[in-house]
Structures are given as structure tokens and as C-alpha cells.
Amino acid sequence: MPDLLKLAMLDTSPLRHRDFRLLFSGQLISFLGSQITYVAVPYQVYALTHSPLVVGLLGVAELVPVLTLSLLGGAIADARDRRAVVLVTEVAFAVLSALLLLNALLPEPMLWAIFAIAAAQAGLFALQRPALDALMPRLVDRADLTAAGSLTGLRGTVGMLAGPAVGGVVIVVAGLPATYGVDVLTFGASLGALSLMRPVPPPEGGERPSIRGVLEGLRFARSRPVLIGTYVVDIVAMFFGMPQALFPAIAETMGGPTVLGLLYSAPALGALLATATSGWSTHVHRPGLAVIVAATVWGLAIIGFGLASTPLAAVALLALAGGADALSGIFRQAIWNHTVPDALRGRLASIEMISYMSGPALGNTESGLIAGAFSVPVSVISGGVLCVLGCAVCAVLLPAFRAYDAESR
């Protein structure tokens, strides 16, 4: 029984490393605030337009700067102090959240300003995330990489669980300006933690950001079928099975902003449960197959969500989907951390970011278009079905990814 409990429990051993502990705690608080804004922005857009399509177009506005700047962000992460890159971009994030606050205080908030700020936030994310992802393996031992990935996933799921739920309540109780104000305040924690961390200089032999360096990262990714598999499966699952742009419309029929917060939080609830009991994941030798299975479960849960008629059923099925997505993320990160050399981590993290950002962004747009042409339930259910079918095709067409054995590397 003790051994079984150990397999189920989250491995917290990476927290013994001081700088990882600082990064973990600071990002936990600031990400919580970001998730409060994550639910406030689409709510405000829907309140101004009452159009699921316009909410879905937020994804397009965010995708363009991600595709434009992510490869640059990866090159910077491999050529500069990664801690400093994260610190500077956190300051810029705080400024953008303050601008959302000021816009919300206007008698008539400007829709174009919300889109512009959302696009700027996405561009900053593209510059920051490669450095943040590449930073983690420098802070822990190699043996702790999978466990550190699980803790990082837990940090994200706690923010995604609590942030939208708190955001929904704050919107109702205090209004949108106060909601954005909470986000601004949370950046103090991350800035303080990053300031206390030791510098993380670029890898030995690191070069200035250049087109040649970017192309080197692209060639490395293209030459590794197992990495290609992580990108393709995630894009398939998110493009077809990502209905978040429809949450405001669905919540309107189930109870309003409070239910909207619960819908955004539900996937994180499942992710939290999956991550908190993920001790067994370090014993999975075929993470590629595990990613395919998890993405398939995601699609099945989204089909069920499209059929749900009550808030309880909707939340439960979204929680199941979120748990599957969290496990997929753990196994994808394990593959990246064990196959990518440190000198290329930033550039490969940027490529990975393009895959996991483009999938949801395009998926939200796709779901909004289908909902506009047919109906919200048709959009959700058809997306889930196509996700399941897409995962089956990936299992057939990506044999190297499916058969990848981490223990043999």
C-alpha cells in the first residue's frame, strides 16, 4: 500500500532547489492573476458584441504575434540570461494589464483596444515562454525533470482552476476594472521572486539571435520524428476540440458570469486531480503513445460536453478533458526535456509554443465559425468527433512517435 500511494502522489523533490522554488512560487501567483484576466477579456468582448464569432476572433488576434515573434523568443532564450528575459517581459505584462484596467474604466470601453492589448500580450508571451520553459531544466537535476514538469503543470492548473472562478465572482461583485486590477497586483510576486533568483547565463557557446540559429532549431525539430509527433497530436486535439470561444454563449443559457467562471475553471480542476496523482507517470516508458491516448480522451470528453444540458454535467466533462490534457502535457514535456540539448532548448521551446498556441487559437476561431453557421452544440460535438478521428490517424501515421521508448534513450 505505501508503494501504491507513492506512485499516486505528486513528486515534490524538485522544490529542494532554491531557484526552482522561487520561480515556482512567483509564477504561481502571477499566473493566477493572468487567468483572472483570461476570463475577463472574452466576457467583456461578448458583453460588448454578443457575438461568439467576435470572441473567437480574439484567437486570431493573439495567434498572429505568436507566429511572428515566437521563433525570435526562442533565439533570445538561447543567447541571453533566461531569468532576465522573463523578468523584463513580466514588467511589460503588468503594464498591459494596467491598460486593460484603464480601458475598462472608460464610460464606453474600446473594443479595438481590447484586441490590441490581447495581441500585445500574446506577443510578449511568445517572447517570454521559450525562456521560461528553457529555464526550468537549468534549475533542477536531470533525474528531476519529469517531476519538475509535473509541478510546473500543477502550478498552471492551480491558476487555471482558481483564476477563472475568482474572476467570475469578482466580475459580478466588483466589476471588470477591479478584476483587471487584481491581475496587476499579482505581478508583484513574480517580479520579487525573479529578482531573488541567481542569473542564468546562456548555454556555453550561445550565439547572438540570428536567422541561422533559428533555422538550426527548425532543422533539429524536423529531424526528430518524436518531436514532430508531440506538435502534430497537440495541434489536432486543440484545433478540433477547443470550444472555449463558445463558453460565454453556453454560460448565458446556464446562469451567467458565475457559470462562465466555472466552465473556464473546470478543465483545470481535472488537470489538478490528474497532476496531483501523477507519481506513476515517471514509470511510463512510452510517452508518445500516452500522448495519443490522452488526446483521444480529451476528444471524447468534449463530445460529452457538447451533449451536456446542466452546469454540473458540463463542468464534470470539462474536468475530464482537462485531466487528459494535463497528462498529455506531462508526457510531451518529458519527451522534450529528454531529447533536446540545452543549447537548443529556447529555440525548440518556441517551436513547441507555436504548436500549442496555434491549435487553441485556430480552434476557438473554428468553433466560433461553425457555431455561427450551425449552432453551438453542433460546433462542440463535431469538434470532439474530429479530434478523436484525428488522433486515430496520428496513431497510424506516426509510428516512431507511437513506439518511442524513453527508457531506451
Image: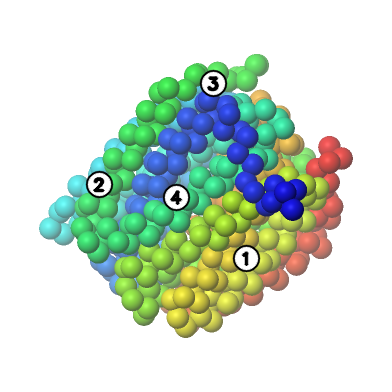
- Alpha carbon of mark 1 to alpha carbon of mark 3: how far? 36 Å
Upstream in sequence: badge 4 or badge 3: 4
Q: Residue at 58% of width from left, 65% of height from top? A: 321
Q: Which amino acid does label 4 sit on?
A: Gly
Determine crowd level at label 2: few under 14, some 14-19, many 20+ residues with C-alpha closer than 10 A. many
Circle on res. 181? 2
Q: In which quarter of the image is the C terminus?
A: top right
Q: Are marks 4 and 3 in contact (CB under 8 Å)?
A: no
- Alpha carbon of mark 3 to alpha carbon of mark 2: how far? 31 Å
Upstream in sequence: badge 1 or badge 3: 3
Q: What residue type is labelled 2?
A: Gly
- Alpha carbon of mark 4 to alpha carbon of mark 2: how far? 17 Å
Upstream in sequence: badge 4 or badge 2: 4
Q: What element carries label 3?
A: loop
Q: Which amino acid does label 1 sit on?
A: Trp
Which residue in the structure is indicated by mark 3? 200
Q: Which residue lies furthest to the top in this view?
A: 205
Left or right of 297 in this view: 94 = left
Q: Are marks 1 and 3 in contact (CB under 8 Å)?
A: no
Circle on res. 159? 4
